[in-house]
Amino acid sequence: MTKLAIALSVVVLLTTAAIAAPIPAGYTCTGNCGTMGASGVVTLSPYGSAAYMYISTESGLGGVGGTPTGGVVGTNGTLLVSPVFSANVDDILAFYFNYVTSDGSGYPDFAWAAVADPSLTSVTYLVTAKTLPSGSIIPGQGMPAIDATLTPPSVPIIGGGPLWNALGGSSGSCWAAGCGYTGWVLSEYKIPTAGDYVLAFGVMNANDLAYQSGLAIDGATIAGKPIEGTVPEPTSLLLLGTGLSAIGLAAWRRKK
């Protein structure tokens, strides 16, 4: 069965949904970023915020979201960069993340997070995630090595078509083995050199533009102090709808 045929058969009823709000002041987004409350399979994080940030390949931009170094690229996606922050030696940079993908076997969408100098030329990877049919998808296979401590240290996908508003029309859809979500994972990194830094996040489609993926992010702190400002709390509404908007995106799928 083709992806287009599957998309035509998918009808998703969203009984409650969190409406996205803007990213916090000082962050820079290229592509599709926002904040939202608990939505589908993505609950609020252990950090305890009323909302989390997200980035998504849904409505992402061509050529955006690949790794700044290491040459991992795809078709379209999103890049989110934090405000510049100062850190001392041995300060702990920490945040929670949750990788979510409706894509699967043969279409290895990916996401990453890194600490870098403000120009993004000197990069240390803290998270990588890459869609696989089975096994651990964090750290991402074939992606740059990470220097952070992850809790848990490796994560298999929680399978099934993930319901999550940030995926747009792909919410609830699943292309073959490998779609699902990781649940919240903690990343911690000890700063080796005092200086000014940014925290960057990327997510990207692989091979085509259909069946979206995203990264939820919360609790970004340096030495226990939030990097972000106050995250705007989204409004919750009762919505009825379908996943048929996925049809337009599925038509882009280039079968191998």
Image (tube, rainbow, N blue to C red):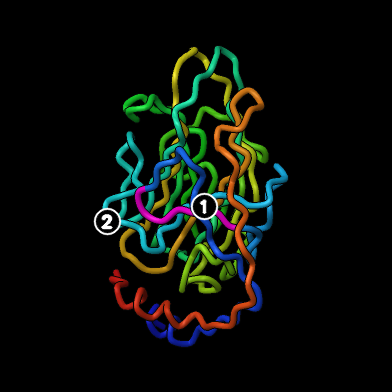
Front in this rendered view, residue 191 or 198: 198
Front in this rendered view, residue 207 or 134: 207
Left or right: 88, with 195 as reference point: right
In terms of secondary structure, what is the magenta stretch mainly?
strand
Q: Residue 54 shows which numbered tag?
A: 1
Residue at x 61% of width, y 32% of height: 226
Dot 1: element:
strand
| Whether residue 173 is situated above or below residue 26 in the rendered picture | below
Residue at x 52% of width, y 52% of height: 54
Front in this rendered view, residue 209 or 88: 88
Q: How many numbered marks are there?
A: 2
Image quadrant holding the C terminus, namely bottom left
Range shown magenta: 30-36
User: Which of the 4 image quarters holds residue 229?
Assistant: top right
Q: Residues within 10 Å of mark 2 (few under 14, many from 20)?
A: some
Looking at the rendered structure, the kind of residue marked 1 is Tyr
Left or right: 132, with 68 as reference point: right
Left or right: 177, with 38 as reference point: left
User: Which of the 4 image quarters holds residue 118?
Assistant: top left
Q: Which residue is mark 2?
A: 62
From the top left corner, tell me how far across and down residue 180 is, in percent: 57, 62
From the top left corner, tell me how far across and down residue 135 is, in percent: 57, 53
Please report whichever mark, 1 or 2, sits nearer to the chain's N-terminal start.
1
